[in-house]
Every structure is written in structure tokens, then in C-alpha cells.
Image (tube, coloured by chain):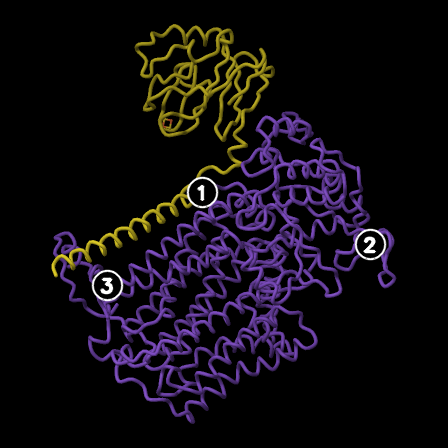
Chain colours: A yellow, B purple
Amino acid sequence: MTTASSAGSTRRDFLFVATGAVAAVGGLATVWPLVSQMNPDASTIAAGAPIEVDLTPIATGQDIKVFWRGKPIYIMNRTKKQIDEARAVSVTELRDPQTDQSRVKDGHDNWLVVIGICTHLGCIPIAHDGNYDGFFCPCHGSQYDSSGRIRQGPAPLNLPVPPYQFVSDSKIQIG
Amino acid sequence: MSGPSDYQPTNPVVKWIERRLPIFGLVHSSFVAYPTPRNLNYWWTFGAILSFMLGVQILTGIILAMHYTPNADLAFKSVESLVRDVNYGWMLRNIHAAGASMFFFAVYIHMFRGLYYGSYKEPREILWILGVIIYLLMMATGFMGYVLPWGQMSFWGATVITNLFSAIPYVGDSIVTLLWGGYSVGNPTLNRFFSLHYLLPFVIAGVVVLHVWALHVAGQNNPAGVEVKTEKDTVPFTPYATIKDAFGVSCFLLFFAWFIFYMPNYLGDADNYIPANPGVTPMHIVPEWYYLPFYAILRSIPNKLAGVIAMFSAIVVLAFLPWLDSARTRSSKYRPLAKQFFWMFVVVCVLLGYLGAQPPEGIYVIAGRILTFCYFAYFLILLPLLSRIETPRPIPNSIAEDVLAKSKGKSAVASVAIMFALAGALFAGSAGNARAAEDLVPPSQSWSFAGPLGKFDRGSLQRGLKVYKEVCSACHSLNYIAFRNLADAGGPGYSEAQAASLASEYKIKDGPNDQGDMFERPGRPADYFPAPFPNEQAARAANGGGLPPDLSLITKARSYERGFPQFIFDFFTQFQEQGPNYVSAILQGFDDKVPADVSIPAGSYYNKYFPGHSIKMPKPLSDGQVTFDDGAPATVPQYAHDVTTFLMWAAEPHLEQRKRIGLQVFVFLILFAGLMYFTKKKVWANAH
Ligand code: FES
């Protein structure tokens, strides 16, 4: 009597567990598309393809802002003074130690290409402003130098360099 | 929702909350301990199915709203980008669109059940009236939702339905202007409909809470129609009703999934794949199937105001049912006459639905009038009369007694009958585009993408693209297809590099540049196929006044009547290739020999399959016009087949994914429903 009922209850338990497990799998599989739909859609991804930028109109000491994937990219044609300043600092004293050389392309030392989004909370720093001849973020006062490195204020990191390369001396491809 | 609970939590946290907000007790008494009659049959699971569907519609609706743009210029396009570009967007849209139909399907069964078993009778009058209010809100919500895709049926449906209010004397026109927010249906109308379509489901949810509250106060009715007397008559809601409802829902999901994955356009209208055009009304305006009986009533009254009044009365009369039918016996099981008339009434409703989909002419009008009379006679003459003259059979003393004396066979027959009747109503609404009877029906061809395992033939897609590029693209745009799509999975099977090089063959207008000028540059994968004409006027001017339609959706935007009973078989065979058959037939339907009884105006051409036979497009394809590299024959039938296949892909680029996921879902659901069945049996074994 006891054995029969316990065998019955095992079978019942197995059935309940199996049904519950299948329901759980179905539930999770249903959640997947409901969440996945929030990712960037195919047209947004396609629109994020690399862009080419002609550098000829940018005179020394000037900069332009272009948009790539909805982000502002600063392209700055640095003066000799700006380059020298950026290279004069001792890297070890920086909050986010990086040499200026590692942030520009060899042979194109005057061109600084950075994503113009403050690493603090995402405001757009103003170019050619602040104490370091670089960028100044008006939101909470972060200051970046002429290499886009954080020097003062609450931001933790340097302005990031986007993936780019020179397709010719006067043309870059971002992305 | 049934008064203070004797729920005694042991967990200290739950206890702490419960003393301050007795929410666990409320849930426990409403959905766990709540006593439900033990003799409920499966028709009672539709309450749970409806709650489930409301949840599904709200959830998918919120998601669709994340991708939808309620603007007259962008709405149609945003829906297309949703189904083409958003991850699983096609699935979410199909769920929401078919979900509306499933919601109504379930609500009709729920209502007929209430009608059959007398669930509206004392003390459940308020419960019933709340149900009628929910139904009205559903109708309003469904209607406004159908407007949102802003296709031809959306636009003209909105025009016709809002114009119903113009029948009101004196203030009608002002009310209509108020509804429109303009002098015609337009952008303001779309915006407010979107807002209300988002709002109303939450209002429905609120009324559903009242409905369930009233249900839990009065207690559930049951097939015997006798009140619960002792504890022996009931079982606790959980696990008994919960598991039974869950099994009901899992079976319903199978039905639902058939539409989502295999028949997404079965319940829709091909015309709604044509963007709204305020200048052209579709040949045959049909509302969604669930409004058809009322639409038939509207049309059968030859007076505008009277028709509108009749239509609304047909719904409002339901609210008075508790007083129209004053018979003491609830369940029609014990009312021999009421039972027969109930089934006749079901048939009347189904037939009215069928008539609603037919053109309002000849025999249909007369039949409509007779059936409209029957509809109202049932409520206003028959039920009051029956309650006075009918002698009911003796009802069981208690629910427990009913369970013991259950006679199985009969209810099964009735169940099957109602299933067929309602399925018929559903199918009746699916009538596609009306085509004049004398037109030839395009022959059904064999398509590789048809059926549950259908896939596109890559070679055919690539050849079709060639035909489009070399022939069709001279006049027809392909606005929704980007070059990148050519490399998408389930498409023509090009590599990304091939798609990019194909794109670079095109000149794309871009700009303005820094000087403010527009300029041309080579195409990129993200660009869309450029249109041959800059605007509609230019297209018309170049084509003798005719506008070559955009081809992106042509295979879904064209259809033809399948007729009764063919469309019922189509549901089971998954036939939905009217569009491809039609497009292919048009391409091959040109004939220089015009039959004597057809007159073709100058600048038009004779086509066997075109409605009215006079088409502005000259014969586009002739043998040898396009050469294929893969050795496929250079013949018109081959061209037509390939370009139609290509256009089917253009209309539904995720077709393969849809069918593949559909198969997985069905395997899962069958397994799950099977497990639920045995689980339910096991649980209920304790109750018998
Ligand atoms: S966001 Fe730039 S300093 Fe805070």
C-alpha cells in the first residue's frame, strides 16, 4: 500500500516537474524576442557604417564636428604649440595615462580625432577652451588637454579615440 | 475579492506586509482558496483565455508603440520598418494583429456561453452588464487599432465608421468634425486614435477588475445553473481551476500560433498593404470580421439614421438581457425550447457575419433584412415569450448531483456544433478583395515558398532581381528594399560584398553638402533602391496618367476572392498565395486579341486577369528580353515566376524565419499542451 502510493506520487511529481520545466522554457523563449526587439534595428545598424571625412577644409588651429553613429566626433587640426604641450607632460602624472603619440596616427601628428562625449556623464565638451588648450566640459567643469586627455574635473577617463584610418593624406575613414 | 480572508501567513515579512496591506490575503482568497463550482466545463476557461489575451495585447502593444510613428506620412512606413528591421518585429506585429482577432473570437465564445447557460440572470446582472461594457470598449479599441497602420482599409474604415455619427440629427456633422480634428480623416485623427488606442486597453483592464470582482461576489454560474449550496459543490480555484484554465490557454495558443506563424494575412485585408490614399476608395470596404454581423445590420436598413440606430441597438440590447429573459431556469440545458432557439440565434449571427462581407446587392440585402429581424426578434420577442410559456425540465438539486448524473454525449455534440458555427463566422470575415464575378481567377501556381516548410528558391530570387532591375525598375519603385537586404539571411543569398558592389552601381542623391547643394554619390548598402521618378506627378506624367505602384508590397497588397467554401479549406492547407498568383497572372495576362464585349480606351491595354481588363501598363515582358546566366529559359512564364518570387521576398523578407520559428513553436506547444493535459488529469483525479 505504502509503496504503491509513493510510486504514484513519484510519477505525479515527475509529471509536475516536467510540465513546470517545459512551461519555464517556453516562458524564457517568449521573453527573448520581447527583449531582443529593443536592440538597434537593422536600418540603424546599417546607418552606422563607416563614413569618410575630407580634411582639406580644416585649417591649422581649427576643428570640425562630424557625426558617426549619432556621436559627435571632433577632428582637430592642432597647432605646433598644441602638439608640443601635449607631449611635454609627464604621462605618469595623468589620471588616465596615455601618451599623445598613442592617441594620434603616426605621421599625422597634427590630427586629433576624438569622440566628443565627456567621460563624466556624457555632455559635449567645448573645443579650444579650458586651461589646457583642449576641451572644456561646461556641465561639471572637466578639462581635457590638447590630446583630449582628462586633466582636471570629475571625468575619469580621456576622450576616447574612435576607430579610424587615413585613406589618403587628406581623408580619413571613421568606423 | 470575496471579503475578508482567513489566510494566515507564517513568513514574518509577509505577515508584516499583510497587517498593513492585506494583498496576499486578497490574492489568496480570490485566486487560491476561492471556491469554484466543480462542474464547470471547458467553455468556462474562456474567461482565463480572455485575461491572457488582454495581457498579450497590452504587452505586444506597448512594444509596437516603441517602434510606431503616429503620423500620417510616416505611420505606414514605420509599420513596415518594424516588420522588416526590428528584431522579431514581424512576430510581434503578427501576434498583436492576430491577437485582436483571437481576443474577439474568445469573447464571442464567452458571450455565447453566458447566453446559453443564463449567466446574466439574477444575481449576475451587473456582472453581465460590465461584460457588455468591456465588449463595447473592445470594439472601440479594435477599430482604432486597425486605423493605425494607415493603409487603405485603415483610412476608409476610419472614414466610414466616424461618419456613422453624422447620422445624428442637428449635431452629427459637428461631432464628426470633432472626432476628426479636421475637415476629413487625417493626421490629427490618426494621432488621437493612437492616443486612445493606447489608453482604452487599460480602461478595459479596469473594467475587467470590476467584472472579476462582481463575479467573485455573485459566484460563478455553472452548466447546471444551480447555485452552490455546500462545500461538496465546489473545488478550490487553485489548483483545480488554475490548471484547467492553463490547459485551456495552451490549447488556445495552438490555434493562435497557426495565425501568427502560418496565416498572418488570413484575417487581414490585402488593401491594407496599400498606403492610405484619400483620393481613392477601395472597391469593397469590409470591416474586420468581428464587426461583420453589425455591419450587415447597418447595411440592411435603407435609412441612414435608422441603420446606425439599429447597429448600436444590436449591441445595447445585450445589456437588457437579464430583464428580457425572465425565465427562472438559468441553464438552457433544462430549457428545451430556449436551447433550440439559442442555436438558431448562433446561426443567425454567423450568417449575418457572412452577409457583412458580401457586397450589399440583390439577395444579400433581402437576406440581411430577414436576419436582422431574426436577431432582434430573438431578444425582444422570443426570449420574453419563452420565459412565460416554456416548461423547463427539472433541474438538479445541487451541483454535486449534476456531476454524478452527467450525460456526456450531448454536450460534446453541442460543443462541436458551436465550434463549427464560430469557426464559420471567423472564416466568413476573411473574404479578400472583392473582384467582379466575371473576372478570370488567376491560376494557382506552385511556389517554393508556400506551405509550412516553404523556402525561397535562391536562383529564382536572383533571376527575379535581374528582371526587376532590367525591366520593372524603369517605372516601378521598390521603396522598402535596401541594398543591404540582398545579403540578409533568407533572401537572394548574396554576400555583403556583392550587395555593396550592386549598391555602388546606383547613383544616390544625397546632401545638402557644405555648400547647400544636393549631390550624387555611389550607393551604399544602407541605401534603398532609388525610385524611377522623383514624385507621383512625374510618374503619372510619364505613364499616361497611371501611377505605377511601388512593388515592395505588391504580392501582399493584391488578392482575389476565394469564395465559400474554398476559404475554409485554405485555412487548413495554409493557402495564402493569392498575391503571387495574381501578380504572375497579370504579367502573363496580356493579349492583343481583345474580346468583343470588352472595350479598351486609348492608352490602355487588355489584360485577362486585371479587374475590369483595362490596364495602363503595356505588356512588360516578352520572350528573350532578359538573359539569365544560369541557363534558365528566357521565356515570359519564367520571368513572371522569378520576378514574382523576388517580389514575394521583397514583401516579406522574413518569411523563411517565420515558418522556421513556427515549426519550433508548434512542436513546443503540442508537447506543452500534452503535458498540461496529463497534469490536469492528475490534479483533478483528487477531486472525483
Ligand atoms: S558631463 Fe562633463 S563634466 Fe560632467
Q: Give the side of residue A134 with respect to residue B85, left or right.
A: left
Residue visible at 62% across and 80% down?
Answer: B369
Q: Going by the image, does B181 lie left or right of A92?
A: right
Disc 3: which residue: B32
Horizontal and vertical percent position of residue B586: 74, 51
Q: Mark 2 lies on which chain?
A: B
The answer for which chain carries disc 1 is A
The subunit carrying tag 3 is B
Q: Name the residue under label 2.
A: B606
User: Pointer 1: what residue?
Assistant: A37
Whether the residues at callouts 3 and 1 have beta carbons within 8 Å, the answer is no
User: Which residue is drawn at the image coordinates 51% and 81% (left, top)?
Assistant: B344
| Residue situated furthest bottom in the rendering | B389
Relative placement, left or right, of B113 versus B290 is left
Q: Nearer the viewer, mark 3 or mark 1?
A: 3
Q: Where is residue B559 in the image (x, y as percent from the top left)?
A: 66, 56
Q: Is mark 3 on a helix, strand or loop?
A: loop
